[in-house]
Image: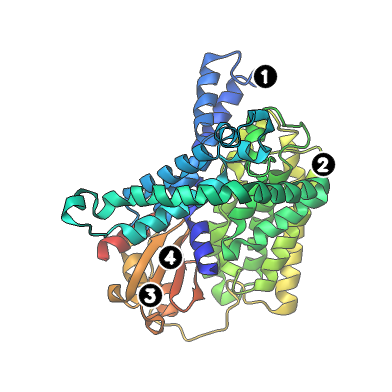
Amino acid sequence: MMKYLQKIGKSLMLPVAVLPAAGILYGIGYWIDPTGWGANSVVAAFFIKAASAIIDQIPILFAIGVSVGMAKDHDGTSALAGLVSFLMITTLLSTGAVAMYRGVDASEVPAAFGKISNAFIGILAGVIGSSCYNRYKDTKLPDWLAFFSGKRCVAIVTAAASIVCAVILYFIWPIIFGALVAFGKAILGLGPVGAGIYAMLNRALIPLGLHHALNAVFWFDTAGINDLGLFWSGADGAVKGVTGQYMTGFFPVMMFGLPAGALAMYHTAKDSKKKTAASLLLAGALASFFTGITEPLEFAFMFMAPGLYLVHAVLTGISAIVCAMLPLRIGFNFSAGFVDWFLSFKAPMAVNPWLLIPVGLVFAVIYYVVFRIVIVKFDLKTPGREDDEEEENKIELSNDDFTTMAKIILEGLGGKENIKEYDYCATRVRVEVNDYTQVDEKTIKKAGVAGVVRPSKSTVQVIVGPKVQFVFDEIKKMM
């Protein structure tokens, strides 16, 4: 079950990668017309509406992205199946449809059905679409139904499965929605402390890939909070000084805290390994600062020093509490990096974005001091502090020698004959192997990757970084 949830989390990275486009478009539009948000400028309205076309359709993006991501061969038929499932469920359970079933006025229909088009349903539809595709894509039917054999029957089966799902949701969705709203309101009612609890759990769940489920509650409209959407749109429900509190606290950590933590890891590395550690930590720190992509850096010490990662999660929670208490609100469309910080200056719900600089510098000092003390006191095996081993043939790779990297990684995984399934996400090559004993982590690390993670016997994750797609493309050619 945990492995399945991790795969869903990985699949969500595909649609999430679309969000930066919305951030850029929103940012340009708001800079052109900072007071009317498009009402006073045709050009600004054009950019803002273009961004809304992405943000407003996040549930559909999730349905398609998850369906494609979880399909065994990532075929486009799976995307169609996910879309079919989403359209059927949301149409069958729309307010108007439920009012018709019950023979009542639309105003008497539970509010839950008015929120049926949300990220959670999008993910569910993606799971249904991909499951139907994986199971029925090779179905052979009798000659008189031969036209609907194979992939052509996937959408039909998906439709039937979605009808069954809609019937079940008709009874349980109001209960689920009520629980989500209650949880969201409970956290919302805790104010800054609630923001801190959420931020800490967000980091703590990353190793399991379950943080996306939590994000759907607070960032999107699953439970009526919609912190991300309201921050950029300023629509009804947005409150100046409140909206954005579930995003702001990540900026001091990703732009200042983690890079400072990387510096602490560099300074505590063994002299003989400082150069090697520097290349890894610097790349991770830059990715975290500019784009808010933290995986290359976090995975560099997450499994080597889990206690330090727990400290990082707690500090993230503290950052969220502090930022929520201050007159500071910043938002993002992709992640809490420099690009989103700059673009959010003119967002409708932004409050004193410049205040991030002093707050971030304070957290940089805290991260550096705390990381350095904890690493030294507990002798944690962060990058550059690993036990000394006999060095074998080191392979020097240029930054763009993806072919060589792919060749080494494939060799370390036991060769292409040992690969059962392979895929990639924002920073990782993910592989299912036939025989885990053939995997040689030392060989894989010769490629200069950030690390190797073994969530289970048959699963291997190679942490490459932001350029993972190019390495994966070379592996795909070799396969």
Identify the disc placed on residue 461. Answer: none
Disc 2 crowd, CA 10 A, few/some/many (<14, 14-19, 20+): some
| Distance from Cα at disc 4 to Cα at disc 1 | 46 Å
Of pointers 3 and 2, the one earlier in the residue sequence: 2
Q: What residue type is labelled 3?
A: Val
Q: Which amino acid does label 2 sit on?
A: Leu
Residue in the picture at 35% in, 48% down: 155
Label 3: element kind = strand
Of pointers 4 and 1, the one earlier in the residue sequence: 1
Q: Are marks 3 and 4 in contact (CB under 8 Å)?
A: no
| Distance from Cα at disc 3 to Cα at disc 4 | 10 Å
Q: Quadrant of the C terminus?
A: bottom left
Q: Measured from the top left, where is residue 84 in percent x and y?
A: 41, 43
Q: Is residue 72 visible?
A: no
Name the residue beneath numbered marker 2: 326
Q: Closer to the observer: label 3 or label 1?
A: 3
Name the residue beneath numbered marker 4: 430
Left or right: 156, with 162 as reference point:
left
Left or right: 347, with 474 as reference point:
right
| Distance from Cα at disc 2 to Cα at disc 4 | 40 Å
| Distance from Cα at disc 3 to Cα at disc 2 | 49 Å
Residue 111 vertical position relative to residue 257 in the rendered view, above or below: above
Q: Is residue 99 visible?
A: yes
Residue 353 vertical position relative to residue 75 in the rendered view, above or below: above
Q: Which amino acid does label 1 sit on?
A: Thr
Q: Closer to the camera, 81 or 140?
A: 140
Q: Closer to the observer: label 2 or label 4?
A: 4
Name the residue beneath numbered marker 1: 35
